[in-house]
Amino acid sequence: MTGSPSGIPRFGVNYVPSSGWWYSWVDWEPASVQRDLMAIADLGADHVRIHCLWPLFQPNPHMVSAVMLGHLESLLDMAHAAGLDVIVTVFNGWLSGFDFRPSWVQDGVSIFTDGAVIAAQESLLRAIAERIGDHPRFVGIDLANEPSVLATDTKNVTTQPEGDAWLTRLLDRCDALMPGCMHSVGMDHLPWLTSTSAFSRGTLASTGAVTPVHAWVFFTGALERYGASGVGTKHLTEYMLELAKAFARDSSRPVWLQEFGIAPEWMPQEVRDEFVAEATRISASVAGLWGITWWCSHDIDRSLGGFVELEYDLGLLTVDNAVKSSGERFRQAVADVRAGSTGPAPTRSHALVLPDAETPDLRFADHFFALIQDGIRPAIVLESRTADAGQLSERGITTLIRP
C-alpha cells in the first residue's frame, strides 16, 4: 500500500467509463474499457479508483449479481494488462450527483443503522472478497463514496455515534475478509470542515489503513473565499491533508488525496490548467501521502441526460480518449514529481495549533494560508496533543503557533 521507496506518492484517477458512465456495468463493453484503461496508463497513472453501483451489484438483500461480479473481475484483469492497480468503491450509494439507494431498502430505514441492511452489506463485501480479494491488482475496498451526503438525507437520519459504528464495523469486516489490503472510506469535506456530520474526524483518522480526503475548491467554498489564483485555493488540498494527519494518533498513518478536480465553469481554461499542475505538485509535497487520485478520468457522454452541467466535463480525457489540456498538465506534473524536478518537500517544523473544541473550517484555514504567504509551510496539531513530545518529535515539529 506504500508509494515508491523514495517517498514519491502514487498517482491515479477516479475511473469514469467513456461509454455509458457506470451504467456500463450493465451494457458491458470490454473493448471500450480496455481502451480507457490504456489511455489512463498513458497519462502516467498507476492506479484507478472504480465505483460499483450498489443496486446493480446487490438487486436483492439476499442476492449478489454473479454477472456484475464477473464484470468486476474482468475490469481488474484489464487493469492488470494496462499496469494499473485498482481500489473498489462498493456502496454507491452517492455518485456524480445521484443517490443509488437500493429499492429493497424501505422508506424510513437507514442504511447505516438497520441490522438487516448491514448484514446485506456484509454479504456483498464477502462476495467481492471471494471473487477478487486475491487478484494481483486489487489494492483494497473503499466502502462508499461520500456517505456523509447520504447520512444527511431524511431516509438515512444518522447520529455521529451510529455513523462511526457503521464504518468501524464494515472496515473491520473488510480486514477480516481481505487481510493485508488497504481498506478505507471515501469521505467528502463535510466531516472535516463542519461539526454536523454523521462521521467524526477522530474515527475517520483511525479506522481503515489510510485516511482519504476529498478536497474540491468549489464545494468547500474555497474558490469563492480566496479566488481562482488565491493561496487558499491553490493550497486547499495541502490544508485538508495536514488536517487529516492532525487527527491521527499514529503519526505514520498515511493520507490519500482521493478526490480533487475542477470544472470549466469555475475557472477560465488557462487558469484551470495551471491549477491542475500546481495543485498536483503542491499536494505531492505532503509527507506520508499514499497517493493523488484525480476526479476524473473521462468526460461523461452528453448523450446521457440528467447530470448537472459540471459533471460532463471533469475528465482529463474526452469520451474518445483524446487527452485534454488538463490531462497534459496532469501528465507533466506527475512526470515532474517523479523526476524530482519540483524541488525538495517543505520541512514542516512549524505547526498551527487547533483547539480541540474548534471547528477547523475555512476561518481556521485562513491562519494556515496566512502562514504559507509568510513563507512557512505548517503542519497542524491538536491542542490536546501539544504536550506529546514524542509525537511532535516524530512529526518533526519544533515550533507551535497558536492563532
Image: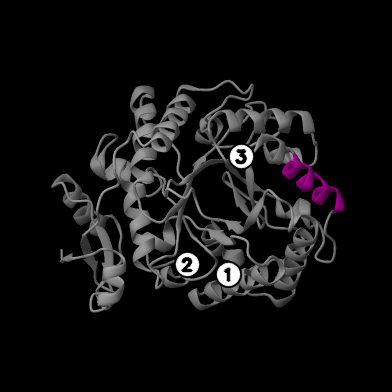
Is 79 on the left-hand or right-hand side of 277?
Answer: right
At horizontal 80% and vertical 51% (from top left) the residue drawn is 69
At which x and y percent is residue 23?
73, 40
Q: Identify the residue position indicated by label 2 in the image.
A: 204
- Mark earlier in primary sequence (3, 2): 3
Quadrant for residue 132, please give it.
Answer: bottom right
At which x and y percent is residue 93?
64, 55
Real-space Cα distance between discs 1 and 3? 24 Å
Q: How is the image coloured?
A: one colour
**Disc assigned to residue 15:** 3
Give the secondary structure at mark 1: helix
Given the image, on which type of amino acid does mark 3 rest? Answer: Tyr
Real-space Cα distance between discs 3 and 2? 24 Å
Is 321 on the left-hand or right-hand side of 339?
Answer: right
Along the viewing direction, whichever of 223 and 338 lies nearer the viewer: 338
Identify the magenta region.
66-77
Q: In the figure, 184 relative to 136: above or below?
A: below
At horizontal 76% and vertical 47% (from top left) the residue drawn is 72
Given the image, on which type of amino acid does mark 1 rest? Answer: Leu
Give the secondary structure at mark 2: helix
Give the secondary structure at mark 3: loop
Mark 3 burial class by Cα count in 10 Å: few <14, some 14-19, many 20+: many
Magenta: main secondary structure equals helix
- Mark earlier in primary sequence (1, 2): 1
Q: Identify the residue position indicated by label 1 in the image.
A: 167
Quadrant assignment for the C terminus: bottom left
* Residues at discs 1 and 2 in contact (Cβ within 8 Å): yes
Given the image, on which type of amino acid does mark 2 rest? Answer: Leu
Along the viewing direction, whichever of 47 and 315 lies nearer the viewer: 47
Q: In the image, is residue 67 part of the stretch drawn in magenta? A: yes
